[in-house]
Amino acid sequence: MTLLEVEDLWVKFPTRQGIFEAVRGVSFSLGKERLGIVGESGSGKSMTGRAILRLIRKPGIVEAGHITLEGTDLMQLSEKEMRKVRGQRISMVMQDPKFSLNPVMTIGAQMMEAYLLHKNTSKTQARAKSLEMLKAVSISDPERVMRAYPHEMSGGMGQRIMIAMMLIPDPQILIADEPTSALDVSVQRQVLDIMDRLVTERGMGLIFISHDLNLVAEFCDRVLIMYAGRVVEVCDADRLHEAKHPYTQGLLNSLPRIEDPRKHLVALKRDDAWAEAPSVSGVKADA
Amino acid sequence: MADAPVTTERRSTAPLFSWAKPIVFTLGSVAVTMLGLLFVTFIIGRVMPIDPVLAVLGERASQEAYDATYKAMGLDQPLLVQFFYYLTDVLRGDFGMSILNARPVSEDIARVFPATLELATIGIIIGVVLGVPLGVVAAVKRGSWIDQIARVVALVGYSMPIFWLGLMGLLVFYGILGWVGGPGRLDIFYEDIVPARTGMILVDSAIAGDWSVFRNAFSHIVLPASLLGYYSLAYISRMTRSFMLEQLSAEYVTTARVKGMSEWAVIWVHVFKNIRVQLITVIALSYANLLEGSVLTEIIFSWPGIGSYITTSLLSADMNAVLGGTVVVGLVFIVLNVFSDLLYRVFDPRSK
C-alpha cells in the first residue's frame, strides 16, 4: 500500500548567480517500508525530506507535480492544514539532538507539547503518554528525564528522546535525516534498533536519509541514490552490490571491506553526464 | 545495550549549601566591587587640584582659620586614614556637606535621584514595550517593509543628537500643539501639594489619590521619557533583531515546526525563551545608562535629576557632592548587574 507518492519534485533557491536547483525532478513512492536516500553532501537528500513537510523557507521554492499522502495532495494544502500534517501524520528526526532540542525547555515540556498540539486531551494524559514513549525508547528513568534539560543528556539519549517525541502523536511516516551521524559509533546501533523496532511495530513508513551506504544497505528495504539533485539509481537494499550506475559502483568501491582487503581504495571519478541524465523514478508499482 | 540505565550527574553538595553558596558569593563580590568603587572615586576626589579648605572658607580666609579647618577636615591625616573615615561615614549614609548649598549631600541625592529614577523607569518601559516586539517582528519578517521601518527608526535613534530631538519635541508638542507640559516636573501651582514619600511625583500623587497632580506630572514627564525611551528602543530593537536572527536558524526551531506548531507559537514559545537571557543584559545596560542621568535631557527639560546634579556640582568644584553622586550611580550599576545575574539563573537552565 502506498502511503506517500512524490512526483517531479523540485527545490530551487534564487541566488545572485541565478537559480540554484537543490532537487531536480525527483519522483518516488513510499509504502510501509524503510526507504533509504543516499548521497553525498549537497546531493539534495535533506532538501527532499524537508520539502515533503513543506519546510523549505522563503526564498526557497518547492515545485512538484504532486506530493500525495494517502490521496491528499500536500502541495494544495493551506499552511494551516499543513500544520495538521506535520507531527501528526509525517514527522522528522534530525541529525544532532544537541541542536534539535530546545535548550531552555525541559524535555517533559517539549514532549508533552508535541502530544498536546494534536490531541485534545489533558496534561495528565499527555504526561502519561510521554512517560510511556520514553520507556519505549529504553529510557529507564523517565520521570527524571522529563524534568531534565537537553544539556544534561548524552547524544544517544538525546536522539532516543527525539525519536520518542516525534513518534508521540502516532505519525504514519517518519523522515530520519542523518539520525545517527552525530552519534558515537557505539550508540548508533542502539538508536537504529530502537527506531527500527518502533517503526515496524507501528506499521509506519520510514524515509532514512544518510550518506552512509553500508548503513542504508543493512537497514533499509529499498534505496534511492541521489546525485546533484537527481535520483541516479533505485534498487533493493539487499541487491545494492549489483548496482549498475557508475556513481553507485564508485561509491561502493571507495569503501573498505573487511572480507576483501585492498591496498588502495579507488577514488570516485565523476562524469558530468550523471548530473544531466534524467532522474530515475523511485515509484514502486503497487502490488 | 538498549536497556542501559540512564545516568545523569548527581550533585555532590548538599542542597542547602548549593543554594547558599551563590548568594554568599554574590554578596561578597558586590561588597568588594563597592569598596573598589569608593576607593577609586575617593582618590580621584583627593588628587583633583581643588583645595577643599578654600572651597569651604573662601579665598580670603586667614592662615589660622585655614589651618584650623584643615585639621578639622582631617586633611592632616594620611590618605588611607582619611579614606577610612570617609568609608565609615558613607556606610552610615553620610556623604558630607555640599559646599554649594551647605546641606548634607545625602539629602540632595535623596531629592534628585527619585526624579531620575522616575524618568528612567518610564523611559525604559517605553523602550522595552515597543523595542522588543519591533525587533522580533523585524527579524521574523526580515527584509519586509516593517524591517525597513525598524532600521530607519534605529538609525535615527543612533545618529540624531538627543538635545536636538528634545528641543524639536518641546517646540512641536509643547510650543505649537500644546499637548504636553513644558520643562520641569510640575506646573508651578501643582508643586508641594502631595507629600513627598518616594520623591517620584507620579507615585506620590497616586498614593495621595490626587489625580490632578498625577495628570500634570504625567504631562510633564511624557515627552522627556518618550525621548529617552526612543533612544533605548533604537538599541533594544536592533539587539533583539540580531538575537532573533541568530536563533531562528537553529535546528530546534525546525523541530518545533515539524511538530506542527504555528509560526507565532514557534517564535514566542520556543525562540523567545532562548533570547531572554541576552535581552536581560541589553535591557539592564540601557536602564543603567538612563539611571546615570541623561545630562542633556535633564538640562533641556529642566529636570532636577542626578545627571544635572553631578554636572553642576563638578562645575562648582563641590567634590563631596560629586563623590556622593558617583557612588550612587555606581551602586545602581552594581545592583542592576546582580539583578540580571539572578535572572540568568532563573531563565537559563545551563547556568545552574
Image (cartoon, grey):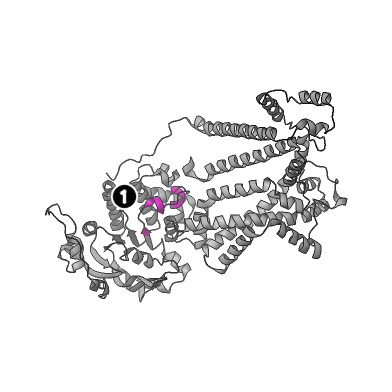
Check residue A97 for magenta coloring.
Answer: yes
> In this view of the protein, can residue A207 be seen by the observer?
yes
Q: Is residue B192 above or below residue A276?
A: above
The single residue placed furthest to the right in the displayed view is B189
Q: Quadrant of residue B45?
A: top right
Check residue A160 for magenta coloring.
Answer: no
Q: State the image coordinates of residue B4 (x, y, percent, origin top left).
A: 30, 42
Q: State the image coordinates of residue B1 (x, y, percent, origin top left).
A: 27, 44
**Residue occupying image coordinates x 28% and y 50%:** A188
Which kind of residue does numbered mark 1 sit on? Leu
Q: How many marks?
A: 1
Q: Which residue is mark 1?
A: A183
Q: Secondary structure at mark 1?
A: loop
**Residue neighbourhood size for the residue with mark 1, other residues' Cα within 10 Å, grouped as few (<14), some (14–19), many (≥20):** many
Q: Which residues are magenta?
A: A92-110
Q: Is residue A142 above or below residue A70?
A: above
Residue nearest the viewer, comparing A165 with A22:
A22
Q: Is residue B263 above or below residue A122?
A: below
> In this view of the protein, can residue B198 be seen by the observer?
no
Question: Does residue A7 appear to the left or right of B206 in the view shown?
Answer: left
Q: State the image coordinates of residue B114 (x, y, percent, origin top left).
A: 74, 43
Q: Quadrant of residue B100?
A: top right
Q: Quadrant of residue A46?
A: bottom left
Q: State the image coordinates of residue A10 (x, y, percent, origin top left).
A: 35, 72
Q: Is residue A190 above or below residue B261?
A: above
**Residue occupying image coordinates x 73% and y 42%:** B310
**Residue occupying image coordinates x 53% and y 34%:** B22
Mark 1 chain = A
